[in-house]
Image (cartoon, rainbow, N blue to C red):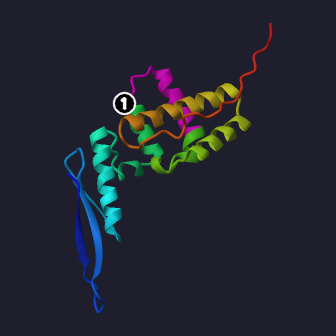
């Protein structure tokens, strides 16, 4: 159960700084805390954490700091793909995704940035290739949601480039 406690911080030659600390135990059993300047903010945070734990939607804030490249490589190694598919995924990630988003923490990628990423792909690549890059990246972010690394995927509901078919 999350709780709030008063926390005094000693400062040399100055009055003590009074802060409020929200403490809780995450689903893995690790005790966490977060400091606030106002008691109401700490209580609100504690209530939010408890609600998320009860709903099963709790995500560790530190987990989303893993970079996309690190998570994607771990994800790729865990997949049971044919060798040709594994090579394709590695090539797509290495050429198109890692140079732009690879060193970013997963939690920092916004929906607008994902949309701009796909738009940039569609300007320089064939529509099918842009769709393929989007599908692979979307799958990685969906897996991160399932692993409770992030709360939602930024690659959902993105308009993809239109594929023109030749009429026979």
Above-or-below relation of 130 to 28 = above
Side of 21 where 138 appears, left or right: right
Q: Secondary structure at mark 1?
A: helix
Residue 62: give x, y in percent of width and height: 35, 53
Above-or-below relation of 168 to 62 = above
Q: What's the magenta region?
A: 79-95
Residue 58: give x, y in percent of width and height: 32, 44
Outermost residue, bottom direction?
Answer: 13
Query: Could you tell me how many numbered marks the image carries?
Result: 1
Please name the residue that numbered disc 1 is placed on. 78
Above-or-below relation of 85 to 119 = above
Residue at image position (28%, 44%) is 53
Side of 129 where 149 appears, left or right: left
- Looking at the rendered image, the quarter that the C terminus falls into is top right
* Membership of 134 in magenta stretch: no
Outermost residue, right direction?
Answer: 167
Does any portion of residue 90 appear in the rendered image? no
């Amino acid at each position: 159960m999350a709780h709030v406690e008063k926390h005094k911080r000693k400062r040399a030659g100055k009055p003590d700084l009074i802060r409020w600390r929200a403490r809780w135990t995450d689903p893995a059993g690790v005790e966490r805390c977060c400091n606030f300047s106002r008691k109401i903010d700490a209580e609100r945070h504690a209530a939010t954490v408890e609600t998320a734990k009860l709903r099963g939607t709790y995500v560790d804030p530190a987990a989303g700091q893993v970079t996309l490249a690190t998570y994607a490589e771990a994800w790729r190694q865990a997949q049971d793909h044919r060798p040709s598919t594994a090579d394709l995924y590695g090539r797509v990630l290495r050429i198109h995704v890692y140079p732009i988003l690879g060193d970013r923490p997963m939690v920092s990628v916004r929906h607008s940035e994902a949309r701009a990423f796909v738009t940039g792909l569609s300007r320089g690549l064939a529509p099918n290739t842009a769709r393929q890059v989007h599908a692979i990246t979307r799958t990685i972010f969906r897996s991160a949601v399932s692993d409770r690394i992030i709360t939602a995927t930024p690659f959902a509901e993105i308009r993809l480039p239109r594929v023109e078919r030749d009429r026979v």
